[in-house]
Every structure is written in structure tokens, then in C-alpha cells.
Image (tube, rainbow, N blue to C red):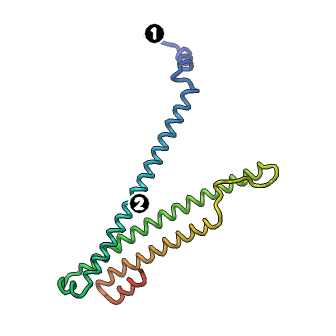
Amino acid sequence: MPRLSVNYRERHIAESPLFSPTQLAPTLWSRATDALETAVERAKRLEDIAEDLEGVLYLFVSAGFIIGSVFFLPSVEESFEGTDIGEVLFTVCSVILLFINLNDLYEVWKSAAIAKKSKRASQIQTTAATTANNDGQPSFDPNFHHHSERHSVRYEVLAGLMYVSGSSLFAIGSVVFIYNGPVGGWMFVIGS
């Protein structure tokens, strides 16, 4: 094969329809956007799976609390004298519930941070639109967040913190109840 000069190769690549910069850039761009969309779809599917798993865990925890409560009935407690099945079920279920509530708090915290970033971006766009307008009036911004949304995010974070606090007291009360019934019982009541 004859040795080609650099100029001939460059000219050949530039004239080739496969390597034309006007065709190559859109192809690369579409591949990159397709890969990004695929990654976003995968992340959304993982979030959906995690949400479903959380719901199933919540059902099992609720069933565990019911079964554990049955073991506290006097007739059942007499049948299983010397075992702490009810206490162990309550302890395991309360720890799982604590992890579920911690995950919920993390999700609320993350969405609040995203909403805050989105609001900042919206304010920057609104400022740019106001200065671009000749009449000085802000143009319509579809990303504008009303004040009530800010308060609802605060309430969601507060509710998440309350759930985690209650679950923590409930989990600690489960362990304390095994050794000191009245103190653990009050922790149950306050935690729930």
C-alpha cells in the first residue's frame, strides 16, 4: 500500500460523508443524549424499585408489630413462658422502621436541596428576563416557585425529622423494655 501524505488523508477525511464534521457532531450529540436519557431512566427505575421495596418492608414491619403484640397477650405469653418473642419482634421491626424513616428523611432532604437549586436557577432566569425586557416587568417564568411550596418543603423535612425521632425512641424503647419494662413502655408511648 502506498504511503499517503498527511494532506491527502486530511482531505479524504474532510470530504468523506462519514467523517464530515457537520454529520459527525450531531451523531455524537445524539449518542451522548441517548446515553444520558438511558442513565436517567435507569436511575428512575432504581428509585421506583427502592420505593416499592420500602413499601413491602413497611407492610412486613406492620405485620411484625401485630404478631409481636399477639405475643404480649396473657394467654399466649403463658404458652411461651421464658421466651421474649414479642420483645424481639418489636425490636427488629422498630429498627427496620427506623431505617425506612431515615431513608424517607434522606429523600425529602435531597428533594429540598434540588428544589432550592431549582429556585435559585429560576431567580437567575427571572432576573435575566427582567433586565432583557424593555418595560422592566418580569416575563412569565414557568419554573417560579410560590411561597407555599417553600413552606411545604419545610413541613416535609420537619415531618421526616419527627418520624426519625419517634422511630429512634421506639427502637431504643424496644431494647430498654427487655431490661426495664416501665421505662421502655414509656419510650414506646412517646416514640409512637
Task: Kindly give the residue lying farthest to the bottom in the view shown.
Answer: 182
Residue 63, image x, y percentages: 31, 72
Q: Which residue lies under the disc numbered 1?
A: 2
In the picture, the quarter occupied by the C terminus is bottom left
Q: Where residue 123 appears, x then y in whole percent?
A: 68, 57
Residue 18 place in picture, x, y as percent? 51, 23
Dot 1 alpha-carbon crowd within 10 angstroms: few under 14, some 14 to 19, many 20 or more: few
Q: Residues within 10 Å of mark 2 (few under 14, many from 20)?
A: some
Please name the amino acid that badge 2 sits on: Glu
157 vs 187: above or below:
above
Quadrant where the image shows the N terminus: top left
Taking 170 as reference, is 40 above or below it?
Answer: above
Looking at the image, which is closer to me, 152 or 110? 152
Q: Secondary structure at mark 2?
A: helix
Mark 2, mark 1: which one is toward the viewer? 2
Looking at the image, residue 104 lies above or below residue 28:
below
For residue 175, side relative to residue 22 (left or right) = left
The image position of residue 67, as x and y in percent, is 27, 76
**What residue appears at the point 52 percent right and 13 percent down from the top-left corner?**
5
